[in-house]
Image (tube, grey):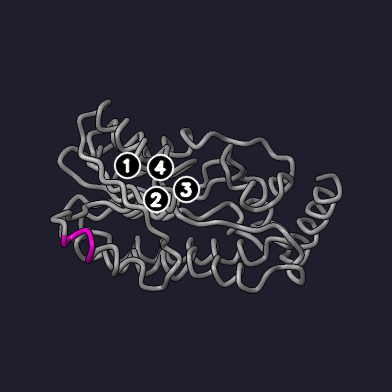
Amino acid sequence: MNAIDYRNQTTIVTGASSGLGEAFARQLAGRGSNLVLVARRADRLERLADELTRAHGVTVTALARDLGRSDAGRALRAELESRGIYATGLVNNAGFGTHDPFGDEDPERLQSMITLNVAALVDLSRAYFEPLTAAGNGVLINTASMLGYQPMPYMSTYGATKAFVLSFTEGLWEEARGTGLRVLAISPGAMDSEFFDAAGSQSADLGTKRISPEAVVSIALKSLDRRPGPPSVITNGRSLPLASRFLPRQAVVRLIGALQRRAMSHG
């Protein structure tokens, strides 16, 4: 173990107004990190910022922004540094999914999902890769998903965006080895969060047991404290990724398709 000292660090958390992002904010503040909280809902961000400042004595900046643009990282870094805020950590958590047959998907919503889940995440990672590396003890966490390990009929685009995040982040982990920057992709399974509301379906978890966002964050931060730490970690719901390792891909995708259809018919 080589635990990270978050005191006197500043960590950006995107998608921080609820769920996993809020849990990251709370646990990082508890470890002494100053924070920049980014999401669209200003009222929630400001309430959380006030609460964390009072509880932990850290500096918390709430920034209401829609990150659904391809230059989100460059724009965010320029704005923060114009305020004298220089980040040493980044948690790319903003994202959303949908749960529909592909032929029924709204093309504009699909493009918005790809922009936020992939293009904005890459731009944020690129904008901060050098300063986080130069910090000597920087942290980069990208939220992937258990669904990124195998094809996901009826969530095909979402699953593909998370497969990208997983592969991209594991590549960065290797590039950052020996620099002091710790890189991790976290892949949660079903969580107790607003994800299923945004996806428009409570059946997208296929009936699996949901984990709390707090437990996911605890696993992620403990993984980062290991040296050398892993490039990625599945926090729960390992059965599907394991099946994809031992079964032919055709069998896996047909199995998941059948599970999805059954869940949707009962959802």
Q: Specify whether 66 is left or right of 98.
A: left
Q: Nearer the viewer, mark 4 or mark 3?
A: 4
Q: Secondary structure at mark 2?
A: loop
Residue at x 61%, y 61% (from the top left corner): 159
State if disc 3 and disc 2 touch (CB < 8 Å).
yes
Q: Secondary structure at mark 4?
A: helix
Q: Quadrant of the C terminus?
A: top right
Residue kind at label 1, given as amino acid type: Arg
Q: Residues within 10 Å of mark 3 (few under 14, many from 20)?
A: many
Residue at x 58%, y 43% (from the top left corner): 194
Magenta segment boundaries in residue numbering: 78-82
State if disc 2 and disc 1 touch (CB < 8 Å).
yes
Using the rendered view, name the quadrant where residue 70 is placed: bottom left
Reading the image, the residue beneath label 1 is 226
Reading the image, the residue beneath label 2 is 230
In the rendering, at what x and y percent does residue 7 appear?
18, 37
Q: Secondary structure at mark 3?
A: strand
Label 2 and label 4: CA atoms lie apart by 36 Å
Label 4 and label 1: CA atoms lie apart by 36 Å
Reading the image, the residue beneath label 4 is 43
Residue kind at label 3, given as amino acid type: Val
State if disc 4 and disc 2 touch (CB < 8 Å).
no
Label 2 and label 3: CA atoms lie apart by 7 Å
Q: Which mark is residue 39?
A: none
Asked whether the viewer can see residue 231, the reply is no
